[in-house]
Structures are given as C-alpha cells and as structure tokens.
Image (cartoon, helix red, strand yellow):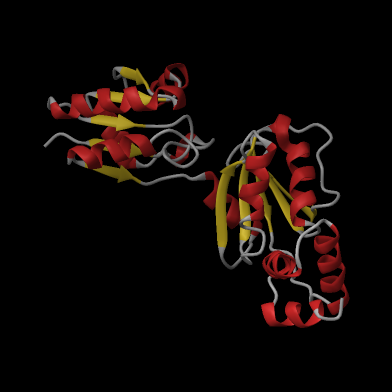
Amino acid sequence: MSRLYIVATPIGNLGDTTERAKKVLSEVDVIACEDTRHTATLLACLGIKKPLVSYYKHKEKEGSEYLAELVESGKNVALVSDAGMPCISDPGSILVKEFRKRGLEYTVCPGPCAFVSAIALTGVTGAFTFLGFLPEKNKDKLDLVSSHKDTGANLIFYCAPHDLNKNLDFLYSVLGETKVYLVKEITKIFESVKEGNLSNLREEEPKGEYIIICEPAAKKEISDEEIRVRLSAEISSGKDKKTAVKEVTERLSVSKNRVYKLSLEL
C-alpha cells in the first residue's frame, strides 16, 4: 500500500543518517523537501537519485493536497526538511493533517532532532517546553513567552544568528534573571555550548544556528508590600477595588483572599 514517510535527516553529520532513512529514500517514488538544491546535495552524498518536489512553508496547503493526490494514485512519498525532523519548526504538520483527513497511510522514520540533542548537551533536567522560533511581532512574542514563564519548565527556542542578541534581550525583559544555555552547530566542527546568566550572556559575532535554553527562574515570595503597591497602581489608573483585586491576583498568582484583605487597608 502506498504511503507517506516522514523522514528525519542529519542536522550536520552525515553519519547520523539511519539505515532505514537511506532505504526509504532510495525506494520511494518522490521526495518532498524544503530546498531541492540542499536535498539534492544530501542525496548525492548518499548515492541516491530521486525526483524532488518543492514543499515549503508558504505553499504548504497546495503542496499537501498535491502530495496526498500522489499517494492516492499509488505513489510512495518521503517528506524531509533541510535538517532534522519534519514538522518540528519545519513544514509537515499541515501535510499530516491532510493525510489524516483523507484517511491515507503515513508513518515516521525517526532520527536527529536539534532541540532534543541540545537538551543532552546541556544536561538540563526536569520538564521542558519547546517553543520553536519566536514570532516576529513583539505582541505575539510577549504573549507566547509570558504564558509560559511561570510554568516551572525549561523553555527552549530556535534562533537564527542575526536574531540571537535581540532575542536574548527580549527574553531577559520578560523572564528576568535566570540561567541560559546557547547551543550551536550541533554535530558539526564548531559545536559548542555556552552557559551564563540571561542578563549578560551575549555573542559578539553570532554564527551558525542557535538553540536557547532558559532554565526556570526561582520563584520569589511575594511580599504584602508588593501587593499593596500593585493594588495602589491599579486603583490609581482608574480601576475600582474589585477589578484591582482581580488583576493583582492573576498577575502575581497569589491568593485572592490575601489580596482582598490587603485592599481593605488602602
């Protein structure tokens, strides 16, 4: 039966190509990829020659329909990204949903994934949340990071070199002081891991693709005085006491009864 194969490819070292990935790529009828030139180079190194179809972010819906139709016609299709596992901050999720909607067969060929490798290289432990690339718009960035800052999980981001320092500045403005790791060029010659404080760890000349891992900041005890200051600020802005109590309770994640009692002193 014809099907789609979601195939992980090396994130740097060709030796990380699995035997199953080589077999699948050599046997399918068509390979869908982000950049045909990049994938053609990979296939040449593996001694494989197959028809390539461009499948990239801005054409995912149309591409998904086309690839589904290929499988419906009896073709076997492989999906690869430029590096690592498709669907993880790379095209693929829309294609999977299209296949599920049509009831078509698909499977995965596991392999390299950059953020998982970064976790191993840093030695961080405990829960983690992978957030991919930060959005372009400041409001979207703020909404995303703010919604995860108090979960107690390590936060993991992908980052292009030209965005590195400004993204670190942004993360510090939202998360405050915490330990941060910068991992780059995983499995390549210049693989490195740097650790430091989010307030001051920066790169003078960022090069290569980065993974940022921010450890959760230690939760501090909220004092009564801080709650009073926040309440006063909310009320001074024109809000009634009931609304002020609600806002402060949610913002500081403290007991509503505690905030209400302190509001009575104002």
The residue located at (69%, 82%) in the rendering is 257
Going by the image, does 255 lie left or right of 18? right
Residue 49: percent from left, percent from top: 31, 19
Residue 12: percent from left, percent from top: 54, 35
- Residue 255 shows in the view: no
Going by the image, does 96 lie left or right of 264? left
| Image quadrant in which you'd find residue 205 | top right
- Residue 126 shows in the view: yes
Residue 13: percent from left, percent from top: 52, 36
The residue located at (50%, 39%) in the rendering is 89
Residue 83 lies, with reference to residue 250, above or below; the image says: above
The residue located at (62%, 41%) in the rendering is 140
| Image quadrant in which you'd find residue 177 | bottom right
Q: Quadrant of the C terminus?
A: bottom right
Question: Which of the two residues, 53 or 15, is positioned nearer the viewer here?
Answer: 53
Question: Which of the two residues, 54 or 124, is positioned nearer the viewer here?
Answer: 54
Residue 264 lies, with reference to residue 208, above or below; the image says: below
Q: Quadrant of the N terminus?
A: top left
Going by the image, does 178 lie left or right of 63? right
Question: Which of the two residues, 130 or 48, is positioned nearer the viewer here?
Answer: 130
Residue 148: percent from left, percent from top: 62, 57
Instruction: Give the mark count.
Output: 0
